[in-house]
Image (tube, grey):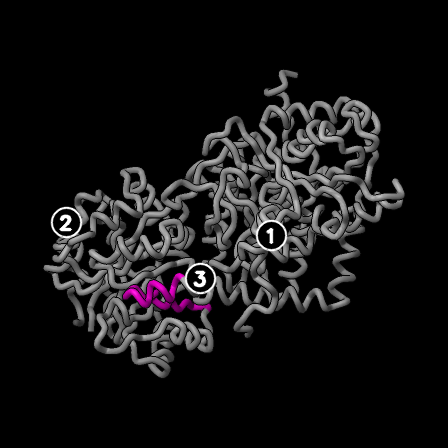
Amino acid sequence: MTDAFALPTRFGAESLGGCYAPETLMQPLLDLEAAFRSALADPAFQAELKAELRHFVGRPTPLTAAPRLAAELGFKALYLKREDLTHTGAHKINNALAQALLARRMGKTEIIAETGAGQHGVATAAACARLGLACTVYMGVTDMARQAPNVARMRLFGTKVVPVEAGQGTLKEAVNEALRAWAGRCDHAHYILGSALGPHPFPTLVRTFQTVIGEEARAQVLEQAGALPEAVIACAGGGSNGLGLLVPFLGDPLRRLAVEAGGHGRALGEHAARLDGGRAGVLHGCKTLLLQDEHGHTAETASISAGLDYPALGPELAALALDGKLEVRRASDDEALAGARLLCEREGILPALESSHALAALPALAAEGAATVLLGLSGRGDKDLSTYQSRMEI
Amino acid sequence: MNPLLPFLMAGDPSLEALPVQLSEARSLGIEALELGLPHSDPIADGPVLQAAAHRAIGRGATPVRVLQTLAGLKDSPDLILFTYLNPLLQIGAERLKTLLAPTPVKALLVVDLPFGEEPAFEADLRAAGYPMVPLLAPTTTLDRARQVLAERPDPGPAAPFAQRFAYVVARLGVTGTAQSTDLAPVRERVTQLRDISSRPLAVGFGLSDAASLAAVRAMGATPVVGSALVRELAEGKSMAACLSPLMDGDL
């Protein structure tokens, strides 16, 4: 039994992150960190993960040049890192599969997960079906309605989807319920958190399993373009996709940008933009930038994208932003829809609503003079067809 | 031995009712009481306390208003403020100490604050007379229990129960009544803890019936009753009608 964490639990000058967990979960979290470190040091685990990522997930994913969209926006070159082409259709599978392998190695027999857009839920459900683990996913009722195809996919994979009716019925409530479920079943269950959030070691674990995105992208862009781009950009909900793409570029002389959900207004409750609306607080086990009211109660959020509709920014991403290592932008619902439409029309690729927020930030980036850009296309938009149809009147 | 540690959610059914609730509890012989500060995201609470917290927030029971309601109350048990960390962090240690000073609050039970995460905040409050209650869960190893009890030390026999006791969580999961809680593991845990600590112990999570309360008292520990009490109070029963049957038994 381990009695202290060995890895750093805090990020940046503001000392964000930490492990603000109920006592029941402390030993499971200590054991998880120990198992994670042991797995990373084990060549057999690394080899199995690499093989699964290649043959089951479909890695490496392509880096696709987007010349027609680049010309439309006024870039010299635009590259898309195609996480939408992974098995299950989003970057979430990288982490879900790795954590499922870790859980099996720990002797756990059940997996618990939360999901917002359903991409993490589907990825976890697929990984569990493949590895023979029982799986329960908690999902807000609002999200179940707006991401119905993903609910059906999870159920087809044999996963039990538990509706969460509390509050706004979105990702925050799903995480609340998943944490409660884990506290009740932590003797045999592992909780696969899908974002770079939660108590230590989750933010570090998720980031570690997602940086494969940026590592591949960096090598691919050097190979295809012969040089690094001037800017790398990704959307940011909790931060798994943002960190996964941006962290491997931290040492490079280029601009790194994360795009938050601007929702439909600037007032508290109308968006999920934590950097210019949030202040440091503790939610779901970590200290980070949090949208909250004057009483320290979590604020409501709004976004057309279920995956970005969350009141807290992952602590490492928030620390990088506060320490000036990346820029954070916001894109509104309407801007995201326009970004999605442009990619569909110019390149024949249907992006997820989450990824569309990164696309929405491109015109401003072009106006600022960026000539070469690499964008993380975190997921595909099939799950969002009903929203696109109703909002775009097609 | 303290026979019962009740839990109330501040502001449920109303903040106006709180002084009377506390006075009634005291007249029934309650020495110490856990008072829940309603939070938007109570990740360690089951459905009954979640609903109570949301009702209370809906009726305006903000953290500051709760503490202001407690200011100057003399006719009250010693209070243990049961809360999540974020509302306290947002109030800040200095203002929190000022708000707590005129209240019967004697200790804090911060569900999502393990020792060592906010050392300066915790030390500041302890020095001002508001120690954090040590929590021990079924997953807490005996080595870690020693660590928790040392980090949140017993102020000694002269201090009131509220500042001395350690909270032993009877089962995995969140607060709330269970179908049945097997008390054998917690009995063993209490025996182990007796070997390493002389402080009073309270046992909670899932207790509601007379038999389980009696079983906890037979361990020499104080039973905590939360969700069962909150549910009955919400149905309109008086504090005396709720607490009297719970006080009976092997005292």
Above or below — where is B61 with respect to B160? above
Residue drawn at x 76%, y 22% as measured from the top left: A345
Looking at the image, how many numbered discs can be counted on the residues? 3
Q: Chain of mark 3?
A: B
Residue drawn at x 45%, y 70% as measured from the top left: B140
Residue with the mark numbered 1: A316
Query: Tag 3, which secondary structure?
Result: loop
**Rendering quarter of residue B12:** top left
Query: Which mark identifies residue A116?
Result: none
Query: Which of the image's four quarters has the N terminus of chain A?
Result: bottom right
Q: Amino acid at mark 2?
A: Ser
Residue with the mark numbered 2: B238
Query: Which of the image's four quarters has the C terminus of chain A?
Result: top right
Q: Amino acid at mark 1?
A: Glu
Query: Which mark identifies residue B118?
Result: 3
- Per the model, the C-alpha gap separating discs 3 and 1 is 18 Å
Chain part drawn in magenta: B121-139
Circle 2: is it few (<14), some (14-19), or many (20+) Cα within 10 Å? few
User: Does the magenta-highlighted stretch encompass residue A299?
Assistant: no
